[in-house]
Amino acid sequence: MKLLFLVVSILLIWWALRLLRRPPLPGRKSEPRVENMVACHKCGLHIPENEAVSRNGRFYCSETHAREEER
Ligand SMILES: [Zn+2]
């Protein structure tokens, strides 16, 4: 039964290594990311770029301001 013991040991080691090597779960909270702040072209409010409304290369704080500026 030496072989069986060896196989079980290898499996256990492989399993342990797999657990250790498992990459951390992708979470947005763990990513320290600095948001690029942009100013609204209409009212000057500063908002993160990913939340800003982009129109003709300009940024706006909301869809409303983007639409008002288009007139
Ligand atoms: Zn605005």
Image (tube, grey):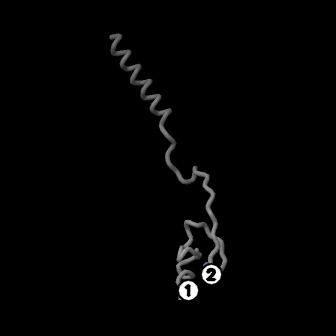
Quarter of the image where the N terminus is located: top left
Q: Amino acid at mark 2?
A: Lys
Q: Is residue 54 above or below residue 9?
A: below
Query: Which residue lies at the image location 50% right of the left edge and 48% below the top edge?
Result: 26
Which residue is at the front of the view, 20 or 39?
A: 39
Q: Is residue 70 above or below residue 23?
A: below
Cα separation between marks 2 and 1: 8 Å
Which residue is located at x 54 percent, y 82 percent?
A: 64
Instruction: Determine which residue is flagged by label 2.
Output: 42
Question: Neighbour class for label 2 at 10 Å: few (<14), some, many (≥20)?
Answer: some
Q: Is residue 7 shown above or below 43? A: above
Residue 49: x and y in percent read: 58, 67
Helix, strand or loop under label 1: helix
- Residue toward you, 9 or 44: 44
Q: Residue at x 58, y 74 (%)?
A: 59
Where residue 6 sits, quadrant-wise, is top left
Q: Position of residue 2 (x, y in %)?
A: 35, 10
Residue type (three-letter) at the residue carrying disc 1? Glu
Q: In which quadrant of the rendered view does residue 51 lie?
A: bottom right
61 left or right of 6 in image: right
Ligand 1 visible in quadrant: bottom right
Q: Which mark is drawn over residue 68?
A: 1
- Circle 2 — which element? loop
Find out whether the residues at labels 2 and 1 contact each other: C-beta distance under 8 Å: yes
Check mark 2 vs ligand 1: CB closer than 8 Å? yes or no: yes
